[in-house]
Image (spheres, helix red, strand yellow):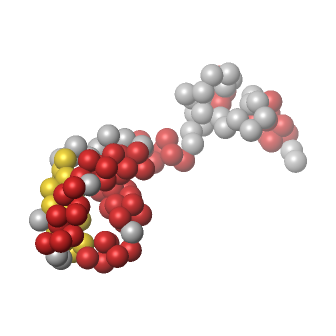
Amino acid sequence: MGEEYDIIQKGRRKGQLASPNRPGVRKEFKNEYTIDELLKVIYDHYDMSDQVSEVAIRNAYNEIAGTLIVQLTRKVEFKEGTLTLTVASAALKQELSYHKEGIKTKINAKIGEEKVKKIVIH
């Protein structure tokens, strides 16, 4: 492949990515980051982490709720730890209110963070 490839491979175990947070990475590889780490830095720098969280929460809700419930949900908003759902029917509102805690737990598990603190259904 080339000398540069050989130098990079010497600093890693098989399958290991060079990342400053991983043990065993040699000093000359400390400036290499994963895409996930770079995106987090960019989002934090430009104050976009809330918008990214909102999109992740909406996508998680759409996956968890299923197509029929998503079609009957008029609006999904997330702000300051509260997920607000506006639904088309009273029956769906009642049904979702019974499952608030389960929905909250599944969404938080899906996004990997404890972002949703409360769910409000209108």
Q: Is residue 69 above or below residue 32?
A: below
The residue lying at 60 percent from left, 37 percent from top is 32
Left or right of 122 in this view: 3: right
The residue lying at 39 percent from left, 60 percent from top is 64
Please give the count of numbered marks on the rendered protein: 0
Does residue 71 show up? yes
- Find residue 115 and report its horizontal and vertical position in percent: 29, 44
Q: Is residue 71 above or below residue 14?
A: below
Does residue 46 show up? no
- Find residue 103 and report its horizontal and vertical position in percent: 31, 53
The residue lying at 21 percent from left, 74 percent from top is 74
- Find residue 88 and report its horizontal and vertical position in percent: 18, 76
Closest to the observer: 62 or 14? 62
Closest to the observer: 107 or 52? 107
Left or right of 79 in this view: 6: right
The residue lying at 26 percent from left, 55 percent from top is 99
Q: Quadrant of residue 89?
A: bottom left
Closest to the observer: 55 or 91? 91
Q: Is residue 74 above or below residue 23?
A: below
- Find residue 93 and report its horizontal and vertical position in percent: 17, 66
Q: Is residue 85 above or below residue 9?
A: below
Left or right of 21 in this view: 88: left
The extreme right residue here reads 1
Where the C terminus falls, by quadrant? bottom left
